[in-house]
Structure formats: C-alpha cells, structure tokens
Image (cartoon, grey):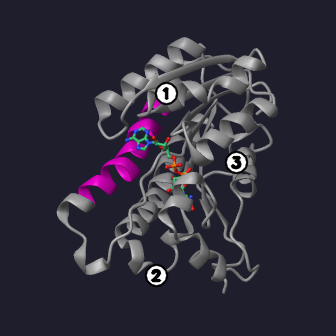
Amino acid sequence: MDGLSVVIIGGGAGLGLLLAEMAVEAGATGLGIIDVNAEAAEAALAPARKAGVKAAFAVGDIRTADSAHAAFNDIAGQLGRVDTVINSAAIYPRKPMLEITDADWDASNAVNIKGTFHICVAAIKQFRAQESDAIVKGRIVNITSVDAFKAHPQNAHYAATKAAVVSLTKSFAHEVAPDNILVNSVAPAGMATEKAREAGFLGELAAASPLGRGGKPREMAEWVMMAGGPKNTYMTGENIIVSGGYIYA
Ligand SMILES: NC(=O)c1ccc[n+]([C@@H]2O[C@H](COP(=O)([O-])OP(=O)(O)OC[C@H]3O[C@@H](n4cnc5c(N)ncnc54)[C@H](O)[C@@H]3O)[C@@H](O)[C@H]2O)c1
C-alpha cells in the first residue's frame, strides 16, 4: 500500500481492523475507516496516528445509499484522495436453511450485497473525479467467502450474498476497466476473527481443511493487500480463493 490512501469499510473489527494495521505497516499515506461502530472505528486509527499517517473515520451504515455515500464522501474529503477501497463489512448469521425468513434475507442482503454495491459506486465516483498520473486510477477489493463456492446449508443466505458479491465484482470490473480502475474480490475460508470465534464454527471449518487447520486472518489479509496494493496493475474482475484446500477437497 506504499504511497496509497486506503479506505476500509468494516475496519472497526476482525479482518478490516487487521488490514488497517497492515496498510500502515506497508506504507499507506492515508487511512480511512467506515464502520457502524464509532468507538471501534476510531480505535482502528491508532496505528495510523502513531505512524503519523493521515487518518480519518466516519460512522456510517452502508445498508442505505444515503448513509454509505455520506460516510464515504466525508472520509474522502478528510483524506483529500482515495486510492484503494476494501469492503470488509458483512454479517454472517447461521440458520437452518428451511427456517430462513424474509427478515433474515433482508438483513443479509442489505449489508453484504447492497452495502458493498453502494460503497463501490461511491468509490468509483471518487476515483473518476480525482486527478491521478498513475496508470491504475483506483483499486477496490471486496471480501467474499469460500461459502460462495460450496454447498452451505448452515448459512445458505449468507453464502448466496457472497456469491452475489463475486458477480458484482465482475460487473463493476467491466464497467470501470476503461477508466483503469481494478475491482477484485478475495474469498477467505474460516478464519479466527473475534466474531467468528464467538459464532463457534471454526472447529468445523478447520476439520474440513486438507491442511488440518483453520486460516489465520493475516494469511487472508496478505492477498487483500496484494489485490489492493501497487503491485497489482493488471488483475481485475477476479476472485482470489484462499481456502487451505477446502475448495478442491
Ligand atoms: N471470519 C471468517 O471466518 C470469515 C470467513 C470468510 C469470509 N469472511 C468475511 O470477511 C469479512 C470480515 O469478517 P470479520 O470476521 O472480520 O467480521 P467482523 O464482524 O469482525 O467485522 C465486520 C465489521 O463490519 C462492521 N459492520 C457490520 N455491519 C455494518 C454496516 N451495516 N455498516 C458499516 N459497518 C458494518 C462491524 O461493525 C464490524 O466492525 C466479512 O466480509 C466476512 O463475510 C469472514
């Protein structure tokens, strides 16, 4: 992320929080966090502030266009420019497949699909409006999941939302390829974030991995850094699966 101004949605916890720290380690010159949790969003800026990196947070609920765009534009204004946007915010409730209600669908669709969509639109408008002499005019990385690619009756609605984000990633990539904006996604297997630990499914996922263990958040985050960082100049519309072999098995 050397020299880039990076905005992380859902950067208040878990993978997004780790990415905030890693972006600063990797030389980001700006860090913005958008999260519904104000306290967590501000706390996520600590490494950036310590390193003297330009830092900004905005409290925003990405489920609606107004709130998502307001938060994004607030951050972009505070940072001055945005080069990389990472969509890590999501919810992942589990429920037996035949018991999933309309309310369950609406909740998951709103954050995971619509929220990702709203932020992609806001990011692209920003990338198109700002001056840049770099070849790549902006990068977006959406976090999907291995669940998008395997049968997942334990959380079928979540898995379907992540498959939708894989699709959105391709459509956005094609829409903005003429602008030299790169849009990709990364699909992690189960990883030990605090939320995932609380949800209690990590043992089951580790057992399903040919490597015999679950992934660490950093092992997933490295691929997000690659897709959203300056070394990526030619990959777009792709989904990187980091599954510890879970997908081929
Ligand atoms: N943890 C896993 O095992 C795992 C596996 C595969 C994929 N993923 C994906 O990785 C990403 C990160 O997962 P995590 O475990 O770090 O999650 P997490 O719950 O720890 O962090 C998500 C963050 O998003 C924020 N958020 C939630 N709803 C929001 C909204 N409406 N508007 C703004 N912010 C909102 C939360 O406040 C939180 O800070 C998610 O996209 C998840 O689907 C996680």
User: Which x, y percent locates residue 74?
Assistant: 45, 17
Residue 227, label in figure: 3
> Residue 151, which numbered label?
2
| Camera-side mark, 3 or 2 | 2
Give percent across and percent down for residue 161.
Answer: 39, 61
Q: Amino acid at mark 3?
A: Ala
Q: Nearer the viewer, residue 79 or 208?
A: 208
Q: CA distance from mark 3 to mark 1?
A: 28 Å
Residue 39: numbered disc: 1
Q: Residue at x 31, y 78 (%)?
A: 97
What residue is rendered at 78% in x and 19% in y? 51
Determine whether, in the image, residue 63 is placed left or right of residue 216: left
Front of the two marks 3 and 1: 1
Name the one closer to the observer, 14 or 8: 14
Q: Is residue 212 left or right of residue 80?
A: right
Q: Tell me the CA gap for discs 2 and 1.
A: 36 Å
